Image (spheres, rainbow, N blue to C red):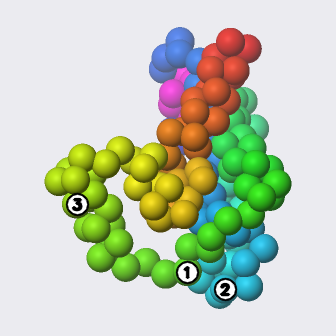
């Protein structure tokens, strides 16, 4: 709350907070890890929205919008965190010169490159929401 109030008070910039993007692409997963991630993302995004409302700043529904897209055709669950897949993907990008979207396709993600970070498809949705907010 303090950050939002300070930004609003000490700058003339248009200020907004974004909800968190989903992690994984299975909103109804029975997997305990994905299910807990889903629960926390919903909880934290609601807090972000509440802070934005209380501070009188904008709110950009990144989570809600991406979730609607994912629900149309659910994908993979993010079932655990391991370092190897991240290093493997870094190798694919840095050594094999594969683009993040190609890595996303190899990994079976539609909106993420690795289940956590948005690929260009997910990023363009988020960017479009920010642009719509700025256009007012």
Circles 1, 2 touching at the beta carbon (< 8 Å):
yes
Which of the image's four quarters has the C terminus?
Answer: top right
Find residue 57 and report its horizontal and vertical position in percent.
68, 29
| Span of residues in magenta | 4-9
Q: Nearer the viewer, mark 3 or mark 2?
A: 3
Q: Which mark is residue 91?
A: 3
Q: Secondary structure at mark 1?
A: loop
Instruction: Residue 71: say if magenta.
Output: no
Q: Is residue 39 above or below residue 54?
A: below
Q: CA distance from mark 1 to mark 2?
A: 7 Å
Q: CA distance from mark 3 to mark 1?
A: 22 Å
Find residue 82 and report its horizontal and vertical position in percent.
37, 79
Please tell me how crowded label 1 is: few (under 14), some (14-19), or many (20+) other residues with Cα within 10 Å. Answer: some
| Residue on which disc 2 sits | 31
- Is any part of residue 72 visible from this angle? yes
Q: Which mark is residue 70?
A: none
Q: Residue furthest left?
A: 95
Horizontal relation, residue 65 to residue 85: left or right: right
Please tell me how crowded label 3 is: few (under 14), some (14-19), or many (20+) other residues with Cα within 10 Å. Answer: few
Residue 22 picture quarter? bottom right
């Amino acid at each position: 709350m303090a950050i939002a109030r300070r930004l609003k008070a000490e700058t003339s910039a248009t200020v907004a907070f974004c909800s968190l993007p989903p992690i994984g692409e299975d909103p109804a997963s029975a997997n305990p890890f994905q299910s807990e991630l889903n629960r926390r993302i919903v909880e934290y995004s609601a807090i972000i929205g509440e802070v934005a409302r209380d501070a009188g700043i904008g709110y950009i529904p990144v989570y809600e919008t991406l979730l609607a897209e994912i629900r149309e055709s659910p994908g993979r669950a993010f079932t655990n965190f391991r370092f190897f897949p991240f290093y493997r993907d870094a190798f694919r990008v840095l050594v094999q010169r594969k683009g993040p979207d190609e890595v996303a396709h190899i990994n079976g993600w539609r909106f993420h490159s690795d289940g956590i970070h948005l690929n260009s498809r997910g990023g363009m949705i988020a960017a479009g929401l920010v642009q719509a907010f700025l256009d007012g």
